[in-house]
Amino acid sequence: MLSASIIAIVFGLVFVAELPDKTAVAGLVLGTRFPWLWVFAGMAAAFLTHVVIAVAAGSLLTLLPRRPVEFVVAALFLLGAVLVWREGQDTEEEEEEQVAEAPDAAGFWRVAALGYGVIFVAEWGDLTQILTANLAAKYHDPISVAIGATLGLWAVGLLAILGGKSLLAVLPLKWITRVAAIVMVALAGYSLITAING
């Protein structure tokens, strides 16, 4: 059964974690070169692919005994906090260099494939993929987690394509990463307490 509260929590966490990510910069760069809807179609499909993989991995963790899973989840949340803190240290210029060059003559399918490929490769082992797997293991509600994570990733992708520079002018990258890291440390603490109290 779907849980609106889980969808909202996952959406918020994934949204904040993805904002400082290099994929947001990739969306911004591709969105300035091609029609936004074409770029978003490819990015959205890639994000959905990664959410399905992450939720499946997180759901497998639920088959293990609860106490060890809580310890693993706590450790992964702490790892995620470190990664998101470090993510904000990268400069925008370095991230833009990682984006593949797009072909000059492109139609919908080529642009969508480019958007899919860039995001699909960039998201492997990414913070939000790890976070989504953790949340799937924690909440035992893969559908709600998948919906929240997908919507969070799509929202960041769309914001990046339509005006990422404006968003970063309002919300400094440093503060976005700090808030995300603090939330993840709090989640790690909660998972650790749950594991100890068993």
Image (cartoon, helix red, strand yellow):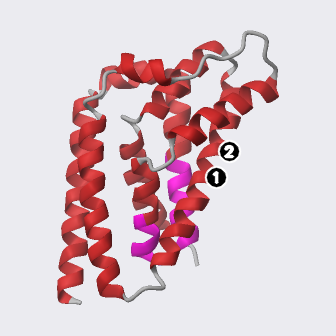
Residue located beneath label 2 in the image = 45
Q: CA distance from mark 1 to mark 2?
A: 6 Å
Q: Which residues are magenta?
A: 134-152
Verify whether residue 162 appears in magenta: no
Drawn side of residue 167 relative to residue 177, left or right: right
- Name the residue rendered at 79%, 11% in the picture: 105
Structural crowding at the residue carrying mark 2, measured as other residues with C-alpha within 10 Å and reported as few (<14), some (14–19) or many (≥20): many
Residue located beneath label 1 in the image = 49
Drawn side of residue 193 relative to residue 98, left or right: left
- Name the residue rendered at 38%, 89% in the picture: 65
Is any part of residue 144 visible from this angle?
Answer: no
Q: Is residue 26 above or below residue 194?
A: above
Q: Amino acid at mark 2?
A: Ala
Verify whether residue 142 appears in magenta: yes
Residues at badges 1 and 2 in contact (C-beta under 8 Å)? yes
Q: Secondary structure at mark 2?
A: helix
Structural crowding at the residue carrying mark 1, measured as other residues with C-alpha within 10 Å and reported as few (<14), some (14–19) or many (≥20): some
Can you tell which quarter of the image residue 119 is in? top right
Q: Which mark is residue 37?
A: none
Drawn side of residue 193 relative to residue 70, left or right: left
Drawn side of residue 177 relative to residue 110, left or right: left
Q: Amino acid at mark 1?
A: Thr
Is any part of residue 86 visible from this angle?
Answer: yes
Tell me the quarter of the image containing the N terminus. Answer: bottom right
Looking at the picture, tell me which residue is in the foreground, 1 or 52: 52
Residue 26, x across and y down, in percent = 52, 26
Residue 88, x across and y down, in percent = 28, 33
Q: Is residue 109 above or below residue 189?
A: above
Residue 6, x across and y down, in percent = 44, 67
Looking at the picture, tell me which residue is in the foreground, 39 or 87: 87
Tell me the quarter of the image containing the C terminus. Answer: bottom left
Q: Main secondary structure of the magenta part?
A: helix
